Amino acid sequence: MRTGRRALGVGACIALAAGAVALRLAVVRVPGEGWVLGWPGEPIAGFRTGAAMTAAAAGAALGVSGAILQGVLRNPLASPFVLGVTSGAGAGVAVAALLAAIAGAAAPAGPALAWPATIGALAALAASLTLARRHGTVDPTTLVLGGVIVGAVSAAITTVAEAMLPPERRGLLMGWMFGRVPEMPDPSALRACTIAALALTGLGCWWGRALDAASMSDDEARSVGVNLGLVRGVLLAACGIATATTVVLCGPIAFVGLLAPHLARGLVGATHRALVPASAATGCALLVGADALRQWIDVGTGRLPLGALTAALGGVAFLILLRRTAGAWGH
């Protein structure tokens, strides 16, 4: 794909993200009139702005993490959620909440959740990669299966921690586990997620050619001078940290990191210097758009949980991608 077409594709992804943000901010449901365009007054405008900023930061971080994981692991199904990284970060937060309750301390929030989420995310990623190694290389099929196992174990740890919490703390953790976009986000958590998304996008663009080479065989990558150990180690750790910031901010969000790179790749191709920023923009558009859609779905008892919506839509897409790619692994 030519440079001009790639630039247009990146621009289209950014425009899509901007459109999703505008939709989240400006579309209002008026009783008796349906959906209308308009800017709400305070404090509603402040709530919507906070939600849009939160979803944009988390979506961008998940989108770029998925693009980089798919590149360095050479697996089109790799993403923070599929590899169990998201669930691992959630388990870290749940265990931290339980330990705080046992110690009689206040429930951890904001920056206090950063370390347990990061440790849980990196531990889950390391476990998935360890389970997938065969004869010194990572097997794509086993990687997905290992990620499913790690995610299931992490979810079980989270459930046990939740069950052991005092009742007055349990509801807060349950609401967070469903995945949500807070309208009044913790400023430090939002700042950390935004910085992580921007830093990971910049790192991915800077190492774009190395990522292109890493997507080929090890021998081909080394033949062009790429230090695979350094590139993979740094980028995998950075993806784990970025995913942890999204979990602290929004809770576990499924499949955004899987879908965003595939949608972006259709517009900009596989060159990572274009794919990485396009995936960040597409991830932003997906999560902001999903949050906007959630506002319009009335389930009778309140709004549909964001995590349920992304899991339902992303699960179907995952099965389609799995069917398309499974045959290729066997050849």
Image (spheres, grey):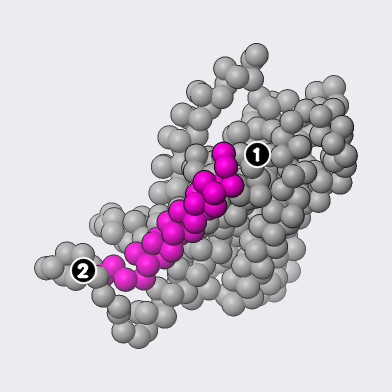
Name above or below for residue 202 compared with residue 50. Answer: above
Q: Earlier in the sequence, mark 1 or mark 2?
A: 2
- Give the residue at mark 2: 36
**Image coordinates for residue 89, horizontal then vertical, percent:** 66, 53
At mark 2, the secondary structure is strand
Image quarter hosting the N terminus: top right
Disc 1 residue type (three-letter): Gln
Classed neighbour count for the residue bearing mark 1: other residues with Cα under 10 Å, few (<14), some (14–19), many (≥20): many
The residue lying toward the viewer, choosing from 210 and 138, is 210
Query: Who is closer to the viewer here, 149 or 65?
Result: 65
Q: Main secondary structure of the magenta part?
A: helix
Secondary element type, mark 1: helix
Residue at figure coordinates x 11%, y 68% from the top left: 32
**Location of the C terminus (image quadrant):** top right
Query: Disc 1 designates what residue?
Result: 70
330 versus 178 height, above or below? above
Percent from the top left, x then y, of residue 135? 85, 22
Residue 55 lies in the magenta-colored region: no
Callout 2 environment at 10 Å: few (<14), some (14 to 19), or many (20+)? few
Q: Residue furthest bottom?
A: 42
Q: Residue at x 64, y 29 (%)?
A: 145
Q: Which residues are magenta?
A: 1-28
Instruction: Please state the horizontal and vertical placement of residue 59, each as a whole percent of the image.
Output: 53, 57
What amino acid is found at the position of numbered circle 2 in the picture? Val
Quarter where residue 142 is shown:
top right
Q: Is residue 208 above or below residue 288?
A: above
Side (left or right) of 34 relative to 3: left
> Residue 71 in the image: x percent, y percent?
68, 39
